[in-house]
Image: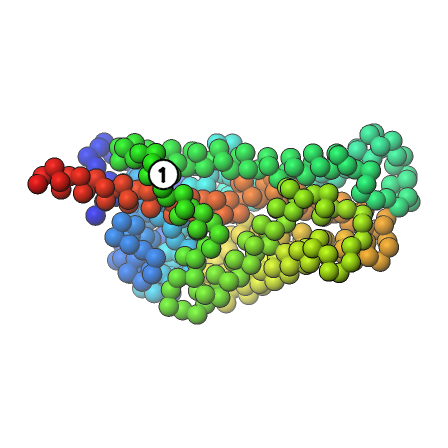
Amino acid sequence: MRGPLSACREVIVHPSLSFDVRKYGKFGEVCYSCGTCTLSCDLTTDEAPFPRRPVQYAVMGLKDPLLESLEPWLCHDCGDCSTKCPQQADPREAMATLRRYLTAQYDWTGLSAKIYTSRAWAIGSLSAAGLLVAFLMVFYHTSVVGMPLSDLTSRPMGLAHMFPTITYFTLSVIFLPWIFMVSNAVRMHRFVMSGEAGARIPLSLYLSEVKTLLFHVVTQERIGKGPEKTHKERHAKHWLIAAGCFIILVLLAFFLRFFQTDNIYPIYHPQRWLGYIATAFLLYGSADVLIGRLGKKKEIFKHSEPEDYALPILLLLMTVTGIAIHILRYMGLTFAAHYMYLAHLVVVVPFLVIEVPFGKCSHMIYRPLAIYFQTVKEKAAGQETQKEGLEAA
């Protein structure tokens, strides 16, 4: 079996690694490495035997193999391993903790580490981003537009006067997070492909497996794997949230003047039904996740860190404020709609600039990348084995 320790190389032990990992959440305090978790997982393979192997890397202080490991991301958090663990060590949560730890290692800014290890930073960073948006909006109206502060509470306002400023602002808060995410993805690649085997992988193999990356970005089909009906249901709900976010992202990034306008379109207009579809997906998905975390009835929701609530709460608030804007506009309450739009931005911007690149939402890029890198690694290993066999013959 090939793995991060299969090659002959110097191994440095970090005795404090397990303590560092535990800063990010619950982590295998009573695990005695029986392997039941790995045997019970429908996603594990001989090349990627998780949860046991990455947990043992952390326990043994093997930081480099842990950073090179993709297995925490190949786990899709179904919870089957925890229900079958004889020690109730909760390997599902151990894998979630490892994902938080790895996210912090990939992030060159250090903000992910602070968010995941400090509740004050988690709440404070989101709050600071929201307050900054509110300040910038007031500053724009008073200093740029020249509207007295007293008029902000008395004069009906539309969106037309905000273009092109709102265009630049929207594109900034959409594409700036992607700059961080792409740079962090580059660091992820450097970690997971840093070994000797990774250095020998040809570019052609990376290019030939791009289809694997795109397939898993679009379908997220691994979430639905497993014999239980709940796996299929969870996959459908997760896909709805992703689809809703994608629709809104495309509309804002490429069709802003079409989507964000003072014009009142008829019910059959694409601007309305695309918005309704995305809203329905996000409302149902985010509410379902939040209710599940609060109820703690399902295994995947029994143990939730504070940062686990940020994503569904922000998505739900984004959706609710968006619905409120729509209703107020069609009621002709321009003034109220404008300030509801400000409240909407106070939620949306922290979600985009903090939660997406540095919080739990970052898994949307790390998980498909992990599957892609793992596929490339396995194909390269297979080619190497075949080459060695031919040479031996």
Q: Label 1, on which residue?
A: 206
Query: Which residue is nearer to you in this view: 26 or 283?
Result: 283
Residue 118 spot, x, y in % from top left: 54, 42
Q: How is the image coloured?
A: rainbow
Horizontal and vertical percent position of residue 61: 31, 40
The structure residue drawn at horizontal position 13% and vertical position 40%, both measured from the top left corner, is: 390
Q: Residue at x 89, y 34 (%)?
A: 148
Extreme-bottom residue of the structure? 229
Q: Is residue 389 visible?
A: yes
Image quadrant where residue 82 sits:
bottom left
Note whether residue 31 is visible: no
Total marks drawn?
1
Residue sitting nearer the eye, 351 or 364:
364
Q: Amino acid at mark 1?
A: Tyr
Q: Left or right of 379: which side holds 316?
A: right
Q: Which residue corresponds to the image point at 60% horizontal and 37% vertical from the top-left?
A: 175
